[in-house]
Image: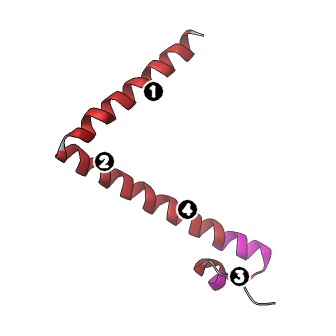
Amino acid sequence: MKKLLWFLVGVAAGFVLAHFVNKDPRGREVLAEVDARIAEFTERIGDAYRLEDARLGGTDAAAAASGSTPAA
């Protein structure tokens, strides 16, 4: 129970810290850069997942990479 309490305190402290960092223009730039990197990472992971799914499923990999479904 004590570990859960410390976890919740840490999460709350993180939110408070992010709020204060976001008030500063330089901090806002840093948070925007971190957000952009996370978005790029998740996009790459999604693309890799779709390609692997297409490879294993036997569908057209190029269609999977573009996000469209192949014609039957």
- Furthest toward the bottom, the residue is 71
Q: Where is residue 16 in the image (x, y as percent from the top left)?
A: 34, 28
Magenta part of the chain: 51-63
In the picture of the structure, the residue carrying the numbered disc 3 is 69
Q: Nearer the observer, disc 4 or disc 3?
A: 3
In the picture of the structure, the residue carrying the numbered disc 4 is 45
In the picture of the structure, the residue carrying the numbered disc 2 is 31
Cα gap from disc 2 to disc 3, whole angstroms: 35 Å
Q: 31 or 47: nearer the eye?
A: 31
| Amino acid on which the number 3 mark rests in the picture | Thr
| Amino acid on which the number 2 mark rests in the picture | Leu
Query: Is 16 displayed left or right of 48 in the figure?
Result: left
Identify the secondary structure beneath mark 1: helix
Residue 11 is tagged as 1
Quadrant assignment for the N terminus: top right
How packed mark 2 is, by other alpha carbons closer than 10 Å (few <14, some 14-19, many 20 or more), is some
- Choose the circle earlier in sequence order: 2 or 3: 2
- Looking at the picture, does residue 34 appear above or below residue 50? above
Label 2 with label 1: CB-CB less than 8 Å: no
Quadrant assignment for the C terminus: bottom right
